[in-house]
Image (cartoon, rainbow, N blue to C red):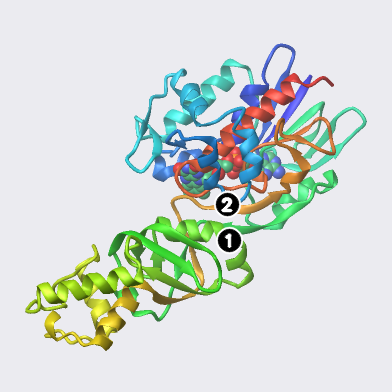
Amino acid sequence: MKVAVIGGGAAGYFAAIHTSGLGIEVTIFEKTPKLLSKVKVSGGGRCNVTHRPMEVSKLIKNYPRGEKFLKRVFQHFSVPDTFDWFQSRGVELKIEADGRVFPTSDSSQSIIDCLQREAEKLKVKIQLSTGIKELNPTEKGFELITEKGVFRVDKVIIASGGQAKSDGYHFLKSLNHRINDPIPSLFTFNTPGEPIRELMGIAVPDGLVKIEGTKLNYRGPVLVTHWGISGPAVLKLSAFGADWLHEHQYQARAIINWNAGFGENDYLEHLTNYTKAHPNRKIHSHSLFDVPSRLWEHLCEKAEIEETVLFGNLTKKSLNKLVQNLFCYILAVSGKTTFKEEFVTAGGIALDEVDPESMRSKYHPNLYFAGEVLNLDGITGGFNFQAAWSTGFLAGKSAKASKL
Ligand SMILES: Cc1cc2nc3c(=O)[nH]c(=O)nc-3n(C[C@H](O)[C@H](O)[C@H](O)COP(=O)(O)OP(=O)(O)OC[C@H]3O[C@@H](n4cnc5c(N)ncnc54)[C@H](O)[C@@H]3O)c2cc1C
């Protein structure tokens, strides 16, 4: 039996490895001259391979698209399986404080070496610089049209990754699968003209960012950059709000609570009590609520509180203004910036046309999908690779087990 895996990335490698077996010839077709190139640069060269083990019900909440689909996929291969798989092949993994998992070597090359060693051992064939231009179902299997000629195989696993433009999916047209248009996910917000950009470099550990007029709101660290705002809360918002933000051409109003542990009344009460306890302290120089001092001064200025004003002299109007700036600081968002560390695309093969128990196409019995080519994506933190390992494993196992 001949199986073609299209794409030499994380999902393609994992699928090829798990398809291999007696009497099965597996070939990875990779359009570029390089294999596993995203793994190489991932996680700043360290490869954030997965995330801290957690229940599947919690794990799936990290996928803006594909949550229900992955719930079924993860029953077959989940985070603990990723740990076992790599560790049993000599790659030790470590969990960092924020839950991200890296090889203890802090080098993505350890992951690459492990995958390549395994594929070599199982005699997986590699066809580099062989992009698939057309993929045609035939009576007995598939015909792959490439610049290096035509290849005929019995089964195909498509693991060609996410595409920035719809053209990237062109070679899949003849399969008649529905493809959701690609849109960006995981980006930071541009706020041109907003004075807050002068505070670039400051961060709050536990902010809450909302998009006005939607139910979208995410909590976590918020970072001010020289072009706008970034940090985990913003990245999560960009991923879960990818469709809405795309539809609105990245024009929105972001509302920030600089300390998510405090509500409007909590701020008011705390400030009133502080004013009574410390009437002679200068407001500008006594930052509260874990707000960095430069940000605190900026919030005081926005509330029109002069530098010399003491807590005891704070007028009700200024107090209310300060609370408003702490609780619902409004920023005009106009445009986005790609998050260089880990960007993914939303979009791809529609999930309702693929069986999550096998990764098999609902239209072609010998066709399977794995990885980011599907309309699924995770937030930053190792979730995208976990989806690649899980879907790759399942596609490979199913392709191996199913009869022709
Ligand atoms: C800079 C960066 C850092 C990242 N860091 C992390 C991280 O630390 N942790 C994490 O979980 N995720 C990370 N991600 C996301 C993660 O890399 C992807 O989700 C993951 O690589 C998807 O794997 P894949 O195999 O589905 O696709 P890909 O890795 O994109 O592989 C697809 C392969 O298919 C090939 N291909 C495409 N079309 C064809 C064709 N027609 N014929 C033949 N071959 C074709 C491509 O050239 C490519 O090699 C990062 C992404 C980027 C860009």
The quadrant where residue 270 appears: bottom left
Query: Disc 2 vs disc 1: which is toward the camera?
Result: 2
The quadrant where residue 263 appears: bottom left
Relative side of 175 to 68, left or right: right
Q: Disc 1 designates what residue?
A: 242
Q: Is the C-beta of the residue carrying label 2 under 8 Å from the nearest atom of ligand 1?
A: no
Per the model, the C-alpha gap separating discs 2 and 1 is: 9 Å
The quadrant where residue 107 appears: top left
Residue drawn 52% across the image and 47% down it: 62
Residue 256 at least partly seen = yes
Q: Disc 2 designates what residue?
A: 64
Check the picture and name the quadrant holding the N terminus. Answer: top right
Question: Which residue is most to the right?
Answer: 139
Q: Is residue 90 or residue 279 the one in the foreground?
A: 279
What residue type is disc 2 on? Pro
Q: Is the C-beta of the residue carrying label 1 under 8 Å from the nearest atom of ligand 1?
A: no
Question: Which residue is most to the top?
Answer: 22
Residue drawn 67% across the image and 48% down it: 375
Residue drawn 42% across the image and 76% down it: 331
Where's residue 180, x and y in %?
Answer: 72, 55
Check the picture and name the quadrant holding the C terminus. Answer: top right
What residue type is disc 1 on? Ala
Residue drawn 42% across the image and 43% down it: 43
Q: Is residue 34 or residue 396 the one in the foreground?
A: 396
Where's residue 2, x and y in %?
Answer: 77, 22
Label 2–label 1 contact, CB within 8 A: yes
Q: Is residue 35 or residue 225 the one in the foreground?
A: 225
- Classify the position of ligand 1 by quadrant: top left, top right, bottom left or bottom right: top right
